[in-house]
Image (cartoon, grey):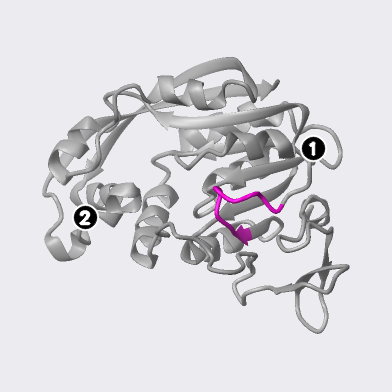
């Protein structure tokens, strides 16, 4: 599976094909001699030059996300994404690209369901440490989604984007004809009760319309699934939920600022949008 994932990769410096070398240490290497050594945790950092200007998730944010996801609160979402992706990943050599893989939980579900090779991209080395541990058979790469992807043209069968930035032009370039793009976004009312108590960011008006507009011209809509997941969360779980996402860059650590008390009943409201290559 890792060999199939590596076969889809390209050197970010010269766009040459990358190969995996195991000796004297695990390295991705191209024919021009560019080398990218594996971190001891198992991921590869392909960012070159100045890297990225975007703020990566911190170690504390990643730890909060792992606690929340490991508890199974979003297991229904992972299962729904895996089921949607699996139909396009049945052929030998199929590859799924998880853009903004984070801790790798959703990619893990897809790989387990389909047996496909996986590529996970994220700008946070702290997230990729977790992702590489969860998905050692995948190619886990530090990369900025807004830059040209280190992936060959027409080389992946499914691109999945779960609460992460979208680069439709690059997704369209790397996906095979007839391939599938799966985008997960929150719907209005998502975790409203938790947001009211923790200062989480609300859902912006017109989010669905903006998604459709950015995708138009690159992909054709193929369906939308709404998924509601009722949750009963404790104070510490609310704290993790607030701190694990984008609001974590703006909120102080809930363990230091004081966690919400008691428990709350809320509903996670997801939209799973499916597109096919135009």
* The stretch drawn in magenta includes residue 103: no
Closer-to-camera residue (19/213): 213
The reply, left or right, for residue 232 in relation to residue 23 is left
* The stretch drawn in magenta includes residue 149: yes
Which secondary structure, mark 1? loop
Q: Is residue 18 above or below residue 24?
A: above
Asked if one can make out residue 40 in the rendered structure from this viewpoint, the answer is: yes
Q: Quarter of the image holding residue 258?
A: bottom left
Image quadrant containing the C terminus? top right
Q: Which residues are magenta?
A: 141-150
The reply, left or right, for residue 200 in relation to residue 23 is left
Reading the image, the residue beneath label 1 is 154
Q: Position of residue 91 (x, y in %)?
A: 84, 33
The reply, left or right, for residue 118 in relation to residue 210 is right
Q: Position of residue 259 (x, y in %)?
A: 15, 55
Outermost residue on the bottom side: it is 24
The structure residue drawn at horizontal position 84% and vertical position 42%, both measured from the top left corner, is: 93
The circle on residue 251 is: 2
Closer-to-camera residue (107/147): 147
Distance in Å between CA atoms under marks 1 and 2: 40 Å
Front tag of 1 and 2: 1
Q: Is residue 43 above or below residue 221?
A: below
Q: Position of residue 71 (x, y in %)?
A: 40, 49
The structure residue drawn at horizontal position 39% and vertical position 53%, both measured from the top left corner, is: 65
Q: Quarter of the image holding residue 209?
A: top left
The structure residue drawn at horizontal position 26% and vertical position 48%, both measured from the top left corner, is: 242
């Amino acid at each position: 599976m890792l060999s199939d994932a590596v076969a889809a990769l390209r050197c970010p410096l010269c766009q040459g094909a990358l190969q995996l070398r195991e000796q004297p240490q695990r390295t991705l290497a191209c024919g021009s001699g560019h080398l990218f050594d594996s971190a001891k945790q198992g991921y590869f950092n392909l960012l070159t030059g100045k890297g990225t200007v975007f703020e990566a998730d911190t170690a504390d944010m990643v730890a909060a996300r792992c606690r929340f996801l490991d508890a199974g609160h979003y297991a229904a979402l992972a299962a729904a994404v895996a089921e949607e992706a699996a139909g396009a990943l049945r052929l030998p050599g199929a590859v799924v690209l998880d853009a903004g893989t984070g801790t790798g939980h959703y990619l893990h579900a897809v790989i387990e369901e389909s047996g496909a090779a996986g590529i996970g991209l994220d700008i946070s080395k702290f997230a990729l440490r977790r992702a590489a541990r969860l998905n050692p058979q995948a190619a886990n790469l530090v990369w900025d989604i807004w830059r040209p992807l280190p992936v060959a043209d027409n080389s992946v069968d499914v691109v999945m984007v779960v609460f992460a930035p979208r680069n439709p032009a690059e997704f369209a370039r790397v996906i095979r004809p007839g391939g599938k793009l799966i985008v997960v976004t929150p719907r209005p009312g998502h975790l409203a009760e938790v947001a009211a108590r923790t200062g989480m960011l609300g859902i912006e008006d017109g989010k669905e319309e903006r998604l459709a507009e950015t995708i138009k011209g690159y992909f054709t809509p193929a369906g939308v699934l709404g998924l509601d997941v009722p949750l009963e969360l404790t104070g510490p779980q609310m704290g993790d939920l607030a701190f694990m996402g984008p609001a974590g860059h703006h909120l102080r650590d809930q363990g230091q600022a004081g966690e919400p008390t008691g428990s709350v009943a809320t509903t996670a409201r997801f939209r799973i949008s499916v597109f096919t290559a135009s």
